[in-house]
Image: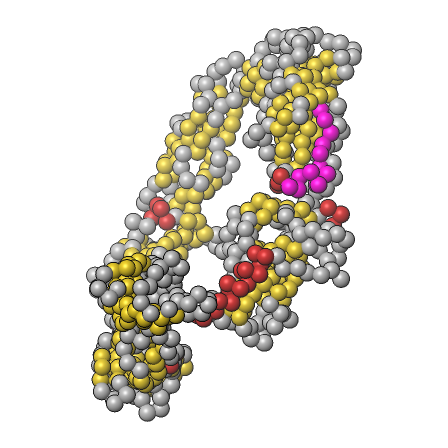
Amino acid sequence: MKTLYFNTLTLIALLMSCLQLSGQAIVINAPEPADNPNLSGVSAWGAVCAGNGGFNEYFVDITWAGTANASNEFILELSDASGDFSSPEILATITDKNSEQNFLASFAIPTTTRGQGYRMRVRSTDPVKIGTVSQAYSMYYMDVTTNLNISELGNGVPPGSVCSTGPVTLRVDNIANPETYQYIWFKSGTQLTGETGHTLEVTQSGMYNAYIDYGPECTGSGNTDSNIVDVTVGGSGTGIAINAPTKTSLCSTDTETLTISVTDTGWSYQWYKDGVEILGAIGTSYTVNASNSGFEGDYAVEISGSSICTEKSAAVTMTNADAFTVTRDNPDNVVVLPSQTQTLSVSTSANTPTYKWFRNGIEIAGQTNNTLDINQDGSYYAEITQTGGSCAITSKNSDTTIAVSPVSFEIGLDYSGTYTACSNTDVVLEVAIINAIATDGSASDVTADLINAFAYQWKKDGSIVTGQNGKSISLASNVENGNYNVEASIDSYNEISNSLSVQLLTNQTVIISSTSTVYCDASDVVTLSASVDLTNESYQWQLDGTTVSSTEAVLNVTNTGTYQLVLDKDGCDLISNEIIISPLDQNLITLDPAGDIVIPEGTSKTVTARGGTAYRWMDASNTEMSTSDNVTFTEPGTYTLIANIDNCEIVRQVEVSILDTFKVPNVITVNGDGINDQWVIPNSYSNKADVNVIIYNEQGEEIVNEFDYKNNWPQSSTAFTKQNMVFYYKIRNASEVLKQGTITVIR
């Protein structure tokens, strides 16, 4: 077992904490790094580099002063990486050190810890106290502690060297989720500033390697240094290209074979479309088939080999000569009402288009325009044929439009905005959706088409609400509470909507007040009253959420706690403000300075009271001295303060005494025996820069006049012409004479 030693700073901090306990129950110092007693050697950590070999055990030295209760817990907390304690991590909870004011605590950092600005602190639970925050520390949990592999292909095979005519991308490829870490990249031994990702685009030749960035203290111990890749960028290529194709705009029946301009049996080939490798396309040619959907794009070929630099050709763009668009311009669902028509339309980019319209899969004779007027339900689409251009004639169909001739309509109401019963003081109800119901029971949303075409009549509790004929209704009073629906009609359709319940809270407010917020004792009376007349109201007085009276219009308080008044307004609770009635706390009245008062003779002392609403100071004969918060004492005696907190009285007594100091000597003997040879005055006057000492001879001449008197008169060289000589002295400060008298010198 190792012996723990306080360092000097820790002892000083602990001593200072003890001296400051007059206004608090406990002081907790910042935790300090400590030696791990389970390891050999003596060395406190300066940074936390956990995870290597699974190690994650560290210690801090915790010091505190004051008094902790038996149920107290000390909790060691860790900030985030920027030192913020908004959501601290709990590292350790200590329950058995409430009488031990210096102890070690062990902790392990979370596996997500990575950063250089972490701070620590200790808080207590009983009494509640947050300790001093520590300095910032570098802390990393190194969950990867093996060598990285970087490669160009990302296949886990270290390439050793790479040669390319253009930029090369190196990437970390042998750890899970490499993008969640930050990295340090090096080029030929020099760190690349600003490069922290798991990939690196290399534009210059050099020797490249990487580490996971675990901070300046931990990176080296993480063992994550990668292999070195020797990259040559801008090496001379062979100048490969794709031979010019016969055509680059293909019809759907066309194919076109792309070939490389230069070949070699020692090369490898890879074809790309839009920068992505084409699986299996590794020959000297590639055939583009326009019958394949999505064949359009940019095609390129790349060569590689042991004796050449990797090189990619310029891309050749292949397009679709058959490509044209067809757009349905009307909604996908339309409603056809009796005596009304709906217009369907399409648009196209086809070259010289022709049109045919179909209903339920059957061509509609004579409809050859891009629009169609309908008055029947069914499934409609248009066939568009491109008759111009270089390709054979091709056709495309538009998206289908479903036309519905409904058997009925479904009218859906909803609250506009947020609504909560007995919370809102106003609300708007609105027609939110109109569905057309087909014969098969299917519903189509036709709100946008028909919401303004219907006629509406709002009802409350089954009765017509006069004048309310719009698609919405606004309610702003609790007298309008009830169940609402709407009748909607169009042509021969008459529909009834769903019903919505409205229970609004009155916009009235109720305020309660009290004669005091402090309950002195059982003989005290604190009264609560309301700002409204409660005679005809249904109400409850509540204490801490529990009903204490429902009949008293004025409530006399008999218990402390939080009071509210709750009124029943049309089934809703109208809740008043809160009034907190607290028990009388004698400690609310404080004196500065506290305790008995001792004043030096001839001086005074002012005592100030705090925490009350009124004050009376009385002397020993019970005579009132002051009604302010302070009084000045000049005489000894027992004095009484009567302080009021609202209706409560608190009495304090102050004992005043006079300081008994030794007197200024009036005789000295200058016989050289070392006893009473000099005039030594009390410390309250000597060695004081603001106290002036003056000595006069028998003729009234000043022989000493100095501040900061050093108790050194007379000097050994001073001559006295008589056996007994009398001198006069005066001791004063800037405003008054403190002492004066005579000095007899006997030689």
Q: Which residue is outermost to the bottom?
A: 523
Is residue 349 placed above or below 210 in the rendered structure?
Answer: above
Is residue 487 placed above or below 97 in the rendered structure?
Answer: above
Residue 658 % position (x, y): 34, 79
Residue 587 % position (x, y): 39, 78
**Residue ID at (64%, 11%):** 242
Total count of labels: 0
Q: How is the image coloured?
A: secondary structure
Front residue of 574 and 562: 562
Residue 618 % position (x, y): 26, 84
**Residue ID at (37%, 75%):** 661
Quadrant of the rendered structure where residue 418 is? bottom left
Indicate the quadrant containing the C terminus: top left, top right, bottom left or bottom right. bottom left
Image position of 192 (left or right of 309):
left
Residue 443: say if magenta.
no
Q: Which residue is outermost to the right?
A: 265
**Residue ID at (66%, 59%):** 5
Is residue 639 placed above or below 302 in the rendered structure?
Answer: below
Residue 465 at least partly seen: no
Residue 218: say if magenta.
yes
Quadrant of the rendered structure where residue 225 is? top right
Residues shaded magenta: 217-229
Front residue of 577 and 727: 727
Residue 666 at least partly seen: yes
Front residue of 100 and 497: 100
Image position of 682 (left or right of 147):
left
Indicate the quadrant containing the N terminus: top left, top right, bottom left or bottom right. bottom right
Front residue of 530 and 272: 530
